Amino acid sequence: MAYPKIIVVDDDPISNTICKLTLEMVLGHVDLESFTNPTDALDYIAEKFEASTLRKTILLLDINMPIMSGWEFLERFDAFNESIKAGIDVYILSSSVDPRDKDRSYANKNVRNYLLKPLTADAIKKVLNIRV
């Protein structure tokens, strides 16, 4: 089974490493790009996905980042071409248990779901619809 490409956007390198290790534990080899700077991630998406045929991509996005919040990221992401947005499933990956953050996530048309940190094997299996 070919798994989707994964993009992780989180200012914390340790969180990114946990994501990578957890994904590898569940999936084996992972096509993963991680970014500690959200602007770099947006540039990557604009450069790599413009005018190309996308295979399904999952983007794991932190919301509490100093350079640009996840909410600001989503505003800029929303300006992308619809064909790009259609190929990328955005999941919030946050340590916030504030119900307002969850509500705001679910109200955003580009967000598929809200996951709590740290990323777990069960969460990955649910996102990718892998049977246990």
Image: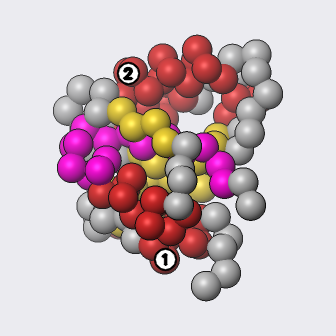
Left or right: 3 in relation to 24: right
Q: Which residues are magenta?
A: 3-17
Residue projecting furthest to the front = 29
Q: Earlier in the sequence, mark 1 or mark 2?
A: 2
Tell me the distance, in whole angstroms, between the alpha carbons under discs 1 and 2: 29 Å
Picture coordinates of residue 4 (x, y %)?
A: 65, 49
Left or right: 104 in relation to 37: right
> Residue under circle 1?
122
> Residue under circle 2?
39
Q: Which mark is residue 80?
A: none
Whether residue 26 is visible, yes or no, is yes
Above or below for 109 versus 69: below
Image quadrant occupied by the N terminus? bottom right
Q: Residue at x 38, y 21 (%)?
A: 39
Residue projecting furthest to the bottom = 132
- Mark 1: secondary structure: helix
Q: Residue at x 58, y 14 (%)?
A: 47
Residue 115 quadrant: bottom left
Picture coordinates of residue 50 (x, y %)?
A: 69, 17
Picture coordinates of residue 77 (x, y %)?
A: 54, 29
Residue 117 quadrant: bottom left
- Mark 2: secondary structure: helix
**Is 14 included in the stretch rendered in magenta?**
yes
Q: Residue at x 50, y 21 (%)?
A: 44
Please tell me how crowded label 1 is: few (under 14), some (14-19), or many (20+) other residues with Cα within 10 Å. few
**Is 70 included in the stretch rendered in magenta?**
no
Q: Nearer the viewer, mark 1 or mark 2?
A: 1
Above or below for 76 versus 5: above
Whether residue 72 is visible, yes or no, is no
Residue 97 quadrant: bottom left
Above or below for 91 versus 121: above
Three-letter code for the amino acid on which mark 2 is drawn: Thr
